[in-house]
Image (cartoon, coloured by chain):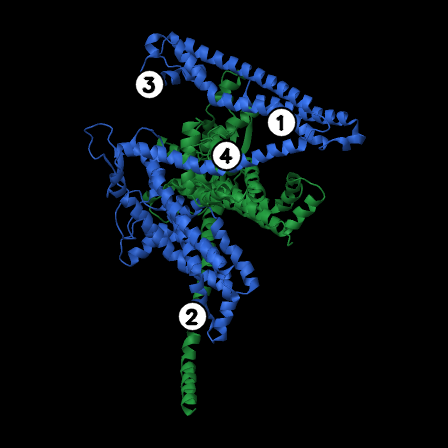
Chain colours: A green, B blue
């Protein structure tokens, strides 16, 4: 007995002695867990912070106020009134004249050229559009806001270090003086950048926009949704309600699970080999992109739809069958409508994935330089994430800003879609 | 007549057939009040008539789209002068291309003679008349089908069963799409890869140590050896995936442990969705983040420490890829940890173990197979990831284990080989498909193993 109590005492002592160490270990372990959660949260903040911080300024664009005299001598010297002749006129010259009037002391070709470089090459297009819309304006003088060059934009936004020696920045000292003078006259202002949302790609950052890319993405998403949702629901209904439990349905099931994990770039190879080379569909077309994304999102939608059908309790089916509905009627009148919120949630999540996907689109040639808006799904187009990829390669500082801004737009779309999915799930979630 | 017009005609025919069929069934029953005499609801008779009216036409359109052009081209070729008709295959396809271009009035090859203009006219007129024949055929088939259905309709006719079996066939066809996709992937990749292996031996591709896909245009060209050894690409892929897993596995696992074992329910409800945002961010955004923020940061840190870090280092790409995978690992491990029965934890607490001892000695060993499975899934994800490495990893195929140097990956090379002009007879373009085949097989194997491991484990506790 004495021996036993002695050994118990020893054990107790050992335990007590080790307790401090064990509690320390416990705290350390818990700290590691908390640290990795905090690390993850910090990463979210860092990622969003760096992109938002880089990009929010792109939603404003520096404009220059000039008094434009629509000189008939330049626009339409023979007074023909023919839109073809007017369309060919040198409208950039009008803006240049007006700029030269503001700085009469500037002379010499080089100086004048660097003065003209302050204006965007898009200024001429804007004037041309105004005149073509309303030829009555010829001969009048208007005070207009015209886009400034991207270098001016960067200076006004404070991205250019004025203290650098002249050689290591792209704006010369004289140009900065002029800009400051214009700003002092109130002729330089940052305005909301509508062109960023409406125009297509451009080599000039101040003219480049996400309009055509967004439209390409829209076409692709419409095609993807209209094909993958009905198909996905049909497959899910078949597998859950009709398929006999045999080797075939087993193969289909394993197949779908594996397809969900195939790298997206392989779907691009499929699109290139089958849709473009074999069926001869046009390259760079949203139609092909939509088909590829359909195949890619199909497994996601099928898996979500199956889970959703599975969660409808058998009592619903039995009740419908017992009052004489056929199996088809039971499924399409009762089970599918009850499972619809879950299916829609899956579809939205699949669409969000499709919207952010770019690797397969590179394979089927959707990385062309697209200025025009695509008007049908057969026209060459690009997509929002691909536009991000294209701009990310451009060396100009102004494009870095625009890349981040395009990402912000993309992320807003994704957040809205995912938010809608969560809202749908919360609103229609039913516990049976 | 365009295909969309034809489809519109079909749709109109379907609607008319539906209404007529429905009307007829009601009339056959002797008015709306006595439709109880019908076997099925009136609308099923409508559906039945519409299906008979439209389905043959749809089949005709599909067959026409698939075959008409080839038939017409053959007729046009047969009408060409003797000399042109017997040209070798490659030239013949050029000739056909020119004729098609002329027919579409896109581009007239000035080197082609008058016989081409004739052929183009023939091509156009054949297409035109084929369209008219097709439209006539569709209407005729529609009327015939409609007539057939019309005479079959009677109160005892089991229309619902017929319609339902058509729907059922439709469902089966839909689920074939999943299999067709796999077959399509396999065939397209395999077919082009086999053509590649005719030019480059399989052993050179699988075990070669140099990758420089610039094939020589001229025989005497310098520096364009065109060697296709994929070992450096695969080594680069594995290096970047390894770095990614070094980040993602500990962080993801500890996050999952903290959220499922320590965090309160309300905390979990807030933190989980925020971390899942990371999973929803498009990979191109991660690539931009890697190139713009992480790579310069690493270079600055490296120069402070006296190390020479390449601006497209494997470390940068791997770190960012790891960030992308964190939510993937943590949500999968979370499921697995939650599946461990509470009784096992309670037993451990009862013996006096602390919380962390229970987790490390009981929960984790029990969950280990599932965690291994999710890690394998994460690896397969990392290997197949494209945009991050395209934007943040290098292009030069260095065979190195130094994470500070630039390496390239399988996916990067696939993108660089296929973006821009493609020639489907050069080894350079075909090499992308061979790489795709390797990628597909490797990720497939990883997924099959991982799914099997996870499923086996789940069965143990459920």
In this figure, which residue is indicated by the disc labeled 3? B89
Label 1 – label 3 distance at C-alpha: 44 Å
Q: Are marks 1 and 4 in contact (CB under 8 Å)?
A: no
User: 10 Å neighbourhood of mark 4: few (<14), some, or many (≥20)?
Assistant: many
Which disc, if any, is residue A28? 2
In this figure, which residue is indicated by the disc labeled 4? A216
Residue A296 on image: x %, y %:
47, 40
Mark 2 element type: helix
Q: Residue furthest bottom?
A: A2
Q: Chain of mark 2?
A: A
Q: Is residue B338 left or right of residue B290?
A: right
Mark 4 element type: helix
Closest to the camera, between mark 1 and mark 3, is 1
Label 1 – label 2 distance at C-alpha: 70 Å
Residue A421 on image: x %, y %:
58, 48
The answer to whether residue A200 is above or below residue B95 is below
Of mark 2 and mark 4, the one earlier in the sequence is 2
Residue A210 in sight: no
Residue at screen point 73% across, 28% down: B155
Closest to the camera, between mark 1 and mark 4, is 1
The answer to whether residue A147 is above or below residue B374 is above
Residue A324 on image: x %, y %:
71, 41
């Amino acid at each position: 007995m004495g021996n036993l109590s002695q050994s118990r005492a020893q054990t107790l002592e050992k335990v007590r002695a080790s307790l401090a160490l064990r509690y320390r270990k416990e705290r350390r372990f818990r700290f590691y867990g908390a640290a990795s959660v905090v690390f993850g949260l910090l990463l979210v903040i860092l990622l969003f912070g760096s992109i938002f911080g880089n990009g929010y300024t792109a939603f404003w664009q520096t404009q220059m106020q000039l008094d434009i005299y629509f000189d008939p001598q330049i626009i339409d010297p023979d007074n023909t009134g023919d839109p073809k002749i007017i369309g060919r006129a040198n409208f950039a010259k009008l803006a240049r004249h007006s700029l030269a009037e503001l700085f009469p002391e500037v002379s010499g070709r080089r100086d004048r050229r660097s003065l003209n470089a302050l204006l965007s090459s898009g200024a001429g297009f804007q004037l041309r559009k105004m005149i073509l819309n309303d030829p009555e304006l010829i001969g009048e003088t208007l005070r207009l806001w015209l886009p400034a060059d991207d270098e001016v934009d960067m200076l006004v936004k404070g991205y250019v270090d004025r203290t650098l020696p002249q050689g290591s920045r792209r704006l010369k000292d004289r140009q900065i003086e002029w800009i400051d003078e214009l700003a002092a006259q109130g002729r330089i202002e940052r305005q909301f950048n509508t062109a960023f949302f409406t125009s297509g790609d451009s080599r000039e950052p101040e003219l480049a926009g996400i309009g055509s890319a967004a439209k390409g993405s829209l076409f692709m998403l419409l095609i993807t949704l209209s094909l993958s949702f009905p198909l996905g629901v049909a497959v899910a209904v078949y597998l859950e309600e009709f398929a006999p439990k045999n080797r075939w349905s087993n193969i289909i099931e394993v197949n779908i699970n594996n397809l969900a994990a195939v790298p997206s770039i392989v779907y691009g190879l499929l699109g290139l080999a089958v849709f473009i080379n074999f069926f001869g569909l046009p390259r760079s077309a949203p139609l092909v992109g939509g088909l590829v994304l359909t195949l890619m999102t199909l497994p996601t939608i099928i898996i979500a739809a199956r889970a959703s059908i599975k969660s409808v309790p058998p009592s619903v089916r039995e009740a419908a069958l017992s009052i004489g509905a056929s199996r088809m009627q039971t499924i399409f009148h009762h089970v599918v409508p009850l499972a619809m919120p879950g299916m829609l949630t899956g579809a939205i999540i699949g669409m969000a994935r499709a919207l952010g996907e770019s690797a397969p689109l590179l394979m089927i040639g959707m990385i062309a330089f697209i200025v025009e808006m695509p008007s049908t799904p057969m026209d060459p187009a690009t997509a929002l994430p691909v536009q991000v990829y294209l701009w990310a390669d451009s060396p100009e500082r102004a494009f870095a800003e625009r890349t981040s801004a395009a990402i912000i737009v993309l992320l807003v779309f994704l957040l809205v879609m995912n938010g809608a999915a969560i809202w749908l799930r919360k609103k229609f979630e039913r516990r049976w | 007549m365009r295909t969309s017009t034809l489809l519109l005609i079909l749709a109109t025919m379907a609607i008319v057939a539906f209404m007529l069929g429905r009307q007829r069934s009601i009339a056959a029953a002797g008015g709306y009040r006595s439709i109880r005499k019908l076997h099925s609801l009136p609308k099923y008779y409508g559906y039945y008539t519409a299906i008979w009216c439209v389905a043959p036409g749809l089949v005709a359109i599909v067959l026409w789209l698939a075959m008409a052009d080839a038939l017409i081209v053959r007729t046009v070729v047969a009408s060409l002068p003797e000399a042109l008709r017997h040209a070798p295959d490659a030239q013949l396809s050029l000739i056909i291309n020119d004729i098609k271009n002329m027919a579409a009035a896109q581009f007239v090859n000035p080197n082609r003679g008058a016989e081409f203009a004739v052929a183009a006219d023939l091509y156009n007129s054949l297409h035109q008349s084929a369209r008219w024949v097709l439209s006539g055929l569709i209407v005729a088939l529609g009327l015939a089908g409609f007539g057939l259905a019309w005479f079959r309709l009677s109160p005892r006719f089991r229309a619902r069963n017929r319609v339902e079996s058509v729907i059922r066939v439709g469902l089966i066809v839909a689920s074939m799409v999943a299999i067709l996709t796999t077959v399509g992937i396999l065939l397209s990749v395999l077919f082009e890869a086999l053509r590649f292996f005719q030019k480059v031996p399989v052993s050179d591709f699988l075990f070669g140590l140099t990758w420089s896909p610039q094939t020589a245009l001229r025989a005497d060209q310098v520096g364009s050896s065109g060697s296709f050894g994929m070992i450096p690409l695969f080594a680069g892929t594995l290096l970047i995936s390894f770095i990614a897993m070094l980040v993602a596995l500990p962080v993801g696992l500890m996050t999952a442990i903290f959220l499922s074992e320590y965090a309160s329910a309300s905390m979990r409800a807030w933190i989980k969705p925020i971390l899942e945002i990371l999973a929803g961010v498009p990979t191109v955004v991660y690539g931009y983040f890697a190139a713009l923020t992480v790579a310069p940061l690493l270079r600055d840190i490296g120069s402070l420490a006296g190390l020479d870090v390449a601006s497209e280092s494997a470390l940068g790409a791997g770190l960012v890829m790891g960030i992308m995978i964190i939510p993937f690992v943590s949500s999968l491990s979370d499921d697995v940890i939650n599946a461990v029965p509470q009784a096992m934890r309670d037993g451990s607490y009862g013996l006096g173990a602390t919380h962390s001892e229970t987790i490390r000695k009981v929960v984790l060993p029990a969950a280990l197979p599932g965690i291994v499975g999710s890690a394998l899934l994460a690896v397969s994800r990392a290997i197949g990831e494209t945009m991050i490495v395209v934007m943040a990893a290098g292009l030069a195929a260095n065979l190195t284990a130094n994470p500070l140097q630039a390496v390239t990956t399988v996916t990067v090379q696939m993108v660089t080989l296929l973006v821009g002009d493609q020639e489907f007879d050069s080894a350079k373009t075909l090499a992308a498909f061979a790489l795709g085949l390797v990628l597909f097989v490797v990720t497939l194997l990883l997924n099959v193993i991982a799914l099997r491991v996870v499923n086996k484990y789940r069965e143990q506790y459920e």
